[in-house]
Amino acid sequence: MKKTPLNSVHHDLGAKMTDFGGWEMPVEYSGIIDEHNTVREKAGLFDVSHMGEIAVSGKDSSSFIDYLITNRVSTAPAGKVVYSPMCYLEGGIVDDLLVYKIEEDRYFLVVNASNTEKDFDWISERAAEVSGDVEVENLSRDYALLALQGPRSEEILSQLTSTGLDDIPAFSFKKIEVDSLNMLVSRTGYTGEDGFELYFDPGEAERIWQSLLKAGEEAGLKPAGLGARDTLRLEKCLCLYGNDISRETNPLEAGLGWTVKFDKEDFVGKEALERIKEAGLSRKLVGFILKERGIARHNYPILSIGEEEIGHVTSGSYSPSLEENIGLGYVETAHASPGEEIKIKIRSRLVAAEVVETPFI
């Protein structure tokens, strides 16, 4: 398995480790529920150095990125971060990613770890198809990435930098000095809480990790693993690639229609998504709460109250914030309204559930 620069630190902390997309990653340290609640109430520190970083540059890079993704970056100012799916011609999702606009002719794409090579190949192939000055480079090995997440994250990070963090609003970034190291810091994350993501030299990973934990000691900062990252993102209904979105799903049915800018002249998958929109959605991604004991796992069948199969679960877990079992899944559009009673088939047992408004919290 691949290892992040902090692998030995996680082992020293006694973290429970797992294989995640070919990377040995920490699942939990003090426990998923404890880490989850710490992030919601105070702050947690995540090692997410497994994520992929791809640079796109050249005088035609702005128009190329607009063609590559469903969202729009050409009108965004430098220093802005744009979230977007990247689609196949048939409308299925290659990946969802963050696009950092460094300058008009320089972009920094952050992609899911398990998709890094696939995404790099896809982007390179699309760049080769268009005429213009576009260069694509995989920089994933050049960066460590830490996510400081939670309501006290600004208070903690401000101890290590002279830069006013109010100058970095949500979905924006700056290159600043943190603990005497120049790095890119963005106000982004995957927890639904306020927080920052720090991109820097992997050789400095252990020092920065320890500096952040020390700065956050009085505020209650704790290391957090992939287990809490998953429950946190699920409560806020942030899609997970490979579960909630994939090549077999499109942004419209996944509730990501707000990222699809049909008024752009063209983008990969536009014609297919226009046809899907015109025909009307046959299914939608919905949130549900189980009314009986049980955890809804990926691909468990979803049934109507009349026990006809109407969809399948994509994500499910116990919600520490709600103290209830929750999940996401695709269901036929006729059954997608909040208040709809459904059933989840958990092995041989049918468990009552209800479609609810999302996000859960």
Image (spheres, rainbow, N blue to C red):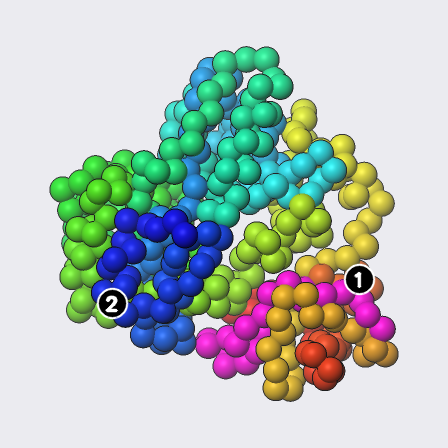
Whole-percent x, y for residue 144 in the image: 31, 45
Q: Secondary structure at mark 2?
A: loop
Q: Mark yes or no: residue 40 visible.
A: no
Residue beneath disc 1: 332
Q: Nearer the viewer, residue 167 or 311?
A: 311
Q: Which residues are magenta?
A: 308-329
Residue beneath disc 2: 13
Whole-percent x, y for residue 130 in the image: 61, 17
Query: Which residue of the protein is positioned furthest toward the top in this rendering?
Result: 132
Say left or right for 125 vs 165.
right
Q: Amino acid at mark 1?
A: Glu
Q: Is residue 166 above or below residue 75?
A: below
Q: Mark yes or no: residue 354 visible.
A: yes
Q: Amino acid at mark 2?
A: Leu
How crowded pointer 2 is (Cα within 10 Å; few <14, some 14-19, many 20+) is rated as few
Q: What residue is at 28 percent from the left and 62 percent from the top?
A: 10
Q: Secondary structure at mark 1?
A: strand
